[in-house]
Image (cartoon, rainbow, N blue to C red):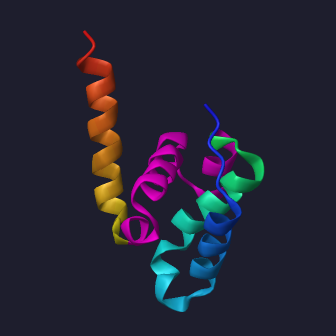
Amino acid sequence: MKVELNEYQINELKQALKDKKNAQHHRKIQALILYSECQNLTAVAKSVGFVHQTVRNLLNRYLEEGLEALLSLSTTRLRSIVHREWTSANFDSK
C-alpha cells in the first residue's frame, strides 16, 4: 500500500532538515523526503543507508505521531523496534 505525504508534511520535513539542531536526525528526515518523491521504500533505503523496513517504520511513526516522535526516536531504539516487529511477524504467526 502506497502512502503519500501531503504538502504540509513535506514542507515540515524540509524545514526540519534545514534546522541544525536536527543534524543527528538528518538521515531519518531525508528518508521521508525522498520517499515523498519516489515512493519506493527499497530505493530510499539504499540511498540513505537503511533497510526498507526501517524506512517503513519511520514513515509510520511520522504519520501516526508527528515530527516530534520521529526526532525523539534514536537509532538504537529504531533498531529494537525493527527487530521486535520482525520477530513478531516471523514467529507469532507460526
Quadrant where the image shows the N terminus:
top right
Number of marks present in the image shown: 0
Q: Is residue 68 left or right of residue 28?
A: left
The residue depicted at 27 percent of the width and 49 percent of the height is: 80
Quadrant where the image shows the C terminus:
top left
Q: Is residue 88 left or right of residue 24?
A: left
Specify the principal SS of the magenta part: helix
The residue depicted at 41 percent of the width and 71 percent of the height is: 71
User: Which quadrant would residue 68 be assigned to in this image?
Assistant: bottom left
The magenta-colored residue range is 42-71
Q: Position of residue 87 (x, y in %)?
A: 27, 29
Q: Position of residue 29 (x, y in %)?
A: 56, 67
The residue depicted at 27 percent of the width and 13 percent of the height is: 93
* In-front residue for pair 11/50: 11
Query: Relative to residue 83, is residue 20 depicted above or below?
Result: below
Q: Is residue 4 left or right of residue 28?
A: right
Magenta span includes 93: no
Q: Is residue 37 left or right of residue 2?
A: right
Q: Position of residue 54 (x, y in %)?
A: 47, 47
Furthest-top residue in view?
Answer: 94
User: Which quadrant would residue 17 be assigned to in this image?
Assistant: bottom right
Furthest-bottom residue in view?
Answer: 20
Query: Relative to residue 74, is residue 91 depicted above or below?
Result: above
* In-front residue for pair 10/80: 10
